[in-house]
Amino acid sequence: MLVLCYLWALALIPFLVEKDDPEVQWHARHGLVLVVAEIALWVALAVISNIPVLGWAIGCPLAPLLWLAIVIIHLIAIIKALQGKRLEIPFVTDFANQWR
């Protein structure tokens, strides 16, 4: 279940199924907030990419780097969760801890 917490929309499964496990709930909340933050970043990148010169200069090179960063963050979060640790990401963790 901890792995599912960081596989984008699949984080809903442990969030809805494992109501009694506080550790799984913590990771599921963080996984869901992380997905929402990633969607917001992709929307911002799409808006920037549609600006004629700025989009070509910033949007095109930034898209593959954003994908790489997202995959790396998810892999690190999965590894830490399997080790019994928590990956605390500054704004994501703050927001997810308020959502209980």
Image: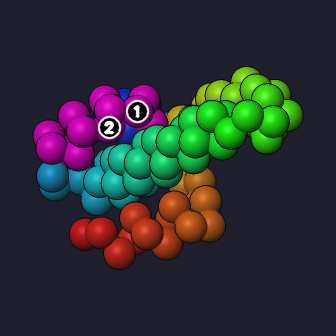
Q: What residue is shown with label 2?
A: 11
Assign a secondary structure to mark 2: helix
**Viewer-side residue, 56 vs 42:** 56
Residue 33 on image: x %, y %: 41, 53
What is the number of callouts on the image? 2
Return the residue at label 1.
8
Magenta region includes residue 9: yes
Task: Determine the image quadrant of residue 50.
Answer: top right
Which residue is at 79% across, 41% downward?
54
Q: Nearer the viewer, residue 46 or 28?
A: 46
Report whether 85 appears left or right of 25: right
Return the residue found at the far front: 52
Which residue lies at the image location 62% right of the left edge and 67% below the top edge?
A: 90
Q: Quadrant of the C terminus?
A: bottom left
Height in image: 89 above or below 9?
below
Residue 20 placement, left or right of 36? left
Q: Tell me what residue is drawn at x 56 percent, y 67 percent.
A: 91
Vertical order, 9 against 16 (above or below): above
- Pick the residue in front: 88 or 38: 38
Helix, strand or loop for disc 1: helix
Q: Position of residue 9 (x, y in %)?
A: 32, 32
Does the magenta run of residues contain 13? yes
Which quadrant would residue 25 be assigned to in this image?
A: bottom left
User: Which residues are drawn in magenta?
Assistant: 6-18
Residue 87 visible in this rendered orientation of the protein: yes
The percent position of residue 38, horizontal first and vertical second, equals 52, 43
Count residues near mark 2 (Cα–Cα under 10 Å), then give few for <14, some for 14-19, many for 20+: many
Cβ atoms at labels 1 and 2 below 8 Å apart: yes
Q: In the displayed image of the protein, which residue is found farthest to the right? A: 57
Mark 1 belongs to which amino acid? Trp
